[in-house]
Each structure stands twice: as structure tokens, then as C-alpha cells.
Amino acid sequence: MTNMHRAGRKWGQAILAAAALLAAQSALAVNDLPGGPAVNQINLQPPVTQIAHDQMWLHNFMLVICLVIFIAVFGVMFYSIFKHRKSKGAVSATFHESVAVEIAWTIVPFIIVILMALPATKVVVAMKDTTNADITIKTTGYQWKWGYDYIKGEGEGIGFLSTLDVAQRESSDSGKPEVVDNYLLKVDNPLVVPVDKKIRIITTANDVIHSWGVPAFGVKQDAVPGFVRDTWFKAEKVGDYYGQCVELCGKEHAYMPIHVKVLSAADYTAWVAAKAKEAAAKADDPNKVWEMAPLMARGEKVYASNCAVCHQPNGKGAGPIKPLDGSPIVNDEDKNKQILTVLHGAGNGAMPSWKALSDTDLAAVITYTKNNWSNKTGQIVQPAEVLADRSK
């Protein structure tokens, strides 16, 4: 076999290997996520609010202006270089300032700035007009989840936490994540709003700076501890829309997704009614005395939904997150120490307050941690004890 044949055979093998690799990657590729990111996306997400439409138009308008400036400036520059090159005998001109040129390069940029500033100002002002909202929702950033409280409008009084789906977190931790379209965007409790209604979002944070953003809505608003800011959107289309915390908020930053479910008016009313029934069902009598077994079973579910993301399912913690397995506070005979820590948080916000959970849920999860893993205290925390400590 000649060297040419050997080379040709090697090239053929390389091409076949590359084709096989591409085929394998195609098999693993995800699909576009409606309301979220698309595969190989190079443009803004399809807008579903008027503000997002205006932002996309403004974006394209600015690109056109920049392209025109680019072509004009570099066109003149390259024309001058080509036309007045030395090989054609061009001789440098000697001249002083030109009044016409001075006026032109002052007026033209001023006109360009005005053309860019007027539509931009109009959009920015519209983005900040949160008046006359149909529904107002307080959005609180925690490390690393979102808390939603409906404080005005239909659904007033509803409140819940929205956390990354446990199965997706475990899939990520495994090092071999499942190939799904909504990877690290699925949550246990999405924010639910009605279509064609103005939704005011009030943002704040419990620990560090977070930022609530949904690209399809054209919304991004920082959530700063100790401060209140607001934004709004009015979704024009029913569907599911996704975003993420867009502020670097700590080591779990990638695990803080946002899922907004936009429903029709009738479906939203039905959802509000269902949440009201759910809240009534969860409103256990704080004076009820629980047995260990049912309290442990409930505590395990509460722990998986709210605590495992930081303290790990095995209670060992990670990095700066202290372990619960063998924790002196958890094993202390004084149950109030752990109750107060859970109620009010600790570490200057490193551990958030969990007052949003019911007295029974808190009693259950504390009981669970006191009697799980190597912790064998035998202690039972009753809802009445949590209720008594809430005011401390």
C-alpha cells in the first residue's frame, strides 16, 4: 500500500469518527424550550409582553444605527486609503481647521444620540411604570430559592417557596445529568399569574443580592437585602416561561431558577381556589399533639423540599454549610435553640429564616433532624412549642 493510500485511509477513518461523534452529540442534544432558552440561540427570546416587544425593537434599531455608522466610517476610511495611496502619487495635503467639518462632526453625533435616546427613554420610562397593577406579588430571594407572597389582587394571602426540583438537583450532583429540555429550570412551585393582567413584582432579599429576571417578559430587577424595588409585566400569551437569578449570589447560584406559569383568567381563578383549600388543609391546629412517626414522615418531606439543597440529603452539609448530622444545636437538650435558629435564621443571613413554613411543618422538620442519621435524641417538637417561640 502506498503512502498516499495510507494517508487516504487515515483521512477516511477520521471523517467517519467525526461523523459518529456528531451523531452521538445530536442524539444527546436537547430541544428548544418554549418560554425558555433555545438550542444555539443567538437572538433575544420571543417576547410575550409589550415591554419585551419594545426592547427587541429598540435592540434591532440600535444595531441598525451602529451598522450604518460602521459602514460610513470604515467606508470613508478605506476609500481614502485606497484613493490616496502612495503608489498613485498621492501627496499629503496641508491645511488648518475647517469650520464646516467642525460643525458637521458636532451636529451629526448629536443627532445620532437624540435618535437613540428618545426611543430608549420611552421604553425605560414604561418599564418603571408599576402603577395600576391588577396583582402585586412580593418576591424574596433566598440562598437559593425564591419566596412569593401575593399581597394585592386576586390570590391575596397566598404564599409559598419555589425551589429547584429535587430530582434535577440530584441529577446534577451525580455528574451525569439527565438530558432534558428544562435542565435546572424545573421548580416545585412555579409562580402562577393570569394572562393579560398587569403583574407588579416587588423584589427584596433575605441574605445577599439576587436578581429576578425572565427574558420573555423583558424583566430583570435586582433583589437587595433591606431594600424594596419593583418591576412589572403583562403576559399576552398563556404558557410556561423561564428565567434564573441573574446576580452572582453564591455557590448555588446555578440552582436558583424561575418558572412563571401564565394561565387563562378562568384557570387562574381555579388555581387560587385550589391554593386556598390547600392552605386551609395545612392550617393544622397548633395545639394538636403529634406522635413521633407521623411527625417524622412529614418532617422528611419538608426537609427534602427545603433543607436538603444546602444541608444535603445525608445531613452532612457542604463547604460553609454546617452539617446537621452530629450538630451540637440539633442534639442540645434545649429544643428552643434549634427552634429559634430555624425561625430567625443564623450566620447573618447565611441560613435564612423559615417563618414562612407552618408551625406544624417546622415542628416536623426539627423533629426529623433530631432523630435522623446519627442524631438519636428521642426528642419530639410539637407545633405549640414553635408557635410559642415565634414572638421571641
Image (spheres, rainbow, N blue to C red):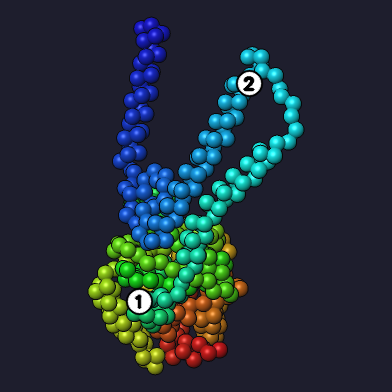
Residue bearing the label numbered 2: 84
Which label sits in the foreground, 1 or 2? 2
Residue 118 visible to the viewer: yes
Q: Can you say which quadrant of the picture contains the C terminus?
A: bottom right
Task: Choose between 269 and 354: the one closer to the eye.
Answer: 269
Of pointers 1 and 2, the one earlier in the residue sequence: 2
Q: Which residue is mark 1?
A: 297
Q: Find residue 14 and report its horizontal and vertical position in percent.
A: 38, 23
Which x, y percent locates residue 339? 51, 83
Label 1 element class: helix
Three-letter residue code for mark 2 = His
98 horizontally vs 197: left or right: right
Q: Residue at x 46, y 52 (%)?
A: 58
Q: Residue at x 27, y 73 (%)?
A: 265
> What residue sits 30% from the left and 78% below the top?
272
Mark 2 residue crowding within 10 angstroms, few (<14) / some (14–19) / many (20+): some
Residue 34 as seen in the image, left or right of residue 175: left
Q: Residue at (34%, 71%) from the top-left corner?
A: 197
Q: Is 265 left or right of 344, judged from the image as shown?
A: left
The amino acid on which the numbered mark 1 sits, given as a three-letter code, is Ala
Farthest-out residue, bottom: 287
Q: Which of these two is toward me, 158 or 22? A: 158
